Image (cartoon, coloured by chain):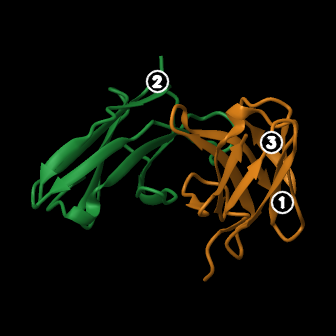
Amino acid sequence: KAGVTQTPRYLIKTRGQQVTLSCSPISGHRSVSWYQQTPGQGLQFLFEYFSETQRNKGNFPGRFSGRQFSNSRSEMNVSTLELGDSALYLCASTAEGNGELFFGEGSRLTVL
Amino acid sequence: QKEVEQNSGPLSVPEGAIASLNCTYSDRGSQSFFWYRQYSGKSPELIMSIYSNGDKEDGRFTAQLNKASQYVSLLIRDSQPSDSATYLCAVNMGTGTASKLTFGTGTRLQVTL
């Protein structure tokens, strides 16, 4: 069974640009959640999607958004990038939306 | 006050010893608790979940939960060098969906030969 796949794995952007990250969950998993990981703040919840609906959102500004498609694949977008957005963005999936998450390898974003 | 607190370590234990990792949380209404392991440069992987007071054993790992004292711990018996990693405690605090976890900043474990 294939794991959670995230693309791209690495990317470099400049301030003011926007970025879109993609996540394909484990087959059969309908819940996809996104986390940001930084050395200073650790892992922080961004949002969760279940059956194409955002079920919950963390305490991030509106520049952070996401969506989920009918095949459960998810994307997150960050607009007007700031230096502080440099982080590892992790996508995780689970079958029924419990806390037993399966993480992808992450997308490492560097903002210059 | 941080919602989920862990000692950042490093916690150094000799090979074959028991490693004890601790975590406290602030929300008494928390329902479910998880331990994730993260190797350097890798993503977190779930090693234990626990939902009710007491102990839960899985191989060399034992998770312990005490809701009255608001702490959860992880014991690793017969520690191996391959157990050297950062261990993240995660709590679902009963708000939002069960996938919304609050993570501690992790305890770095070093198992020495």
On the rendered image, what quadrant is the C terminus of chain B found in? bottom left
Q: Amino acid at mark 3?
A: Thr
User: Disc 1 on helix, strand or loop?
Assistant: loop
Residue at point 48%, 42% (across, down)? B90
The picture places residue A69, in percent across and down from the top left corner, at: 89, 63
Q: Nearer the viewer, mark 1 or mark 3?
A: 3
Q: Colour of chain A?
A: orange
User: Disc 3 on helix, strand or loop?
Assistant: loop
According to the picture, the residue beneath numbered tag 3 turns out to be A14
**For the residues bearing labels 2 and 1, Cβ distance under 8 angstroms:** no
Q: Chain of mark 1?
A: A
In the drawing, what numbered circle is on residue B26?
Answer: 2
Residue at point 66%, 65% (across, down)? A95
Q: Nearer the viewer, mark 3 or mark 2?
A: 3
Q: Amino acid at mark 2?
A: Ser
The picture places residue B17, in percent across and down from the top left corner, at: 10, 55
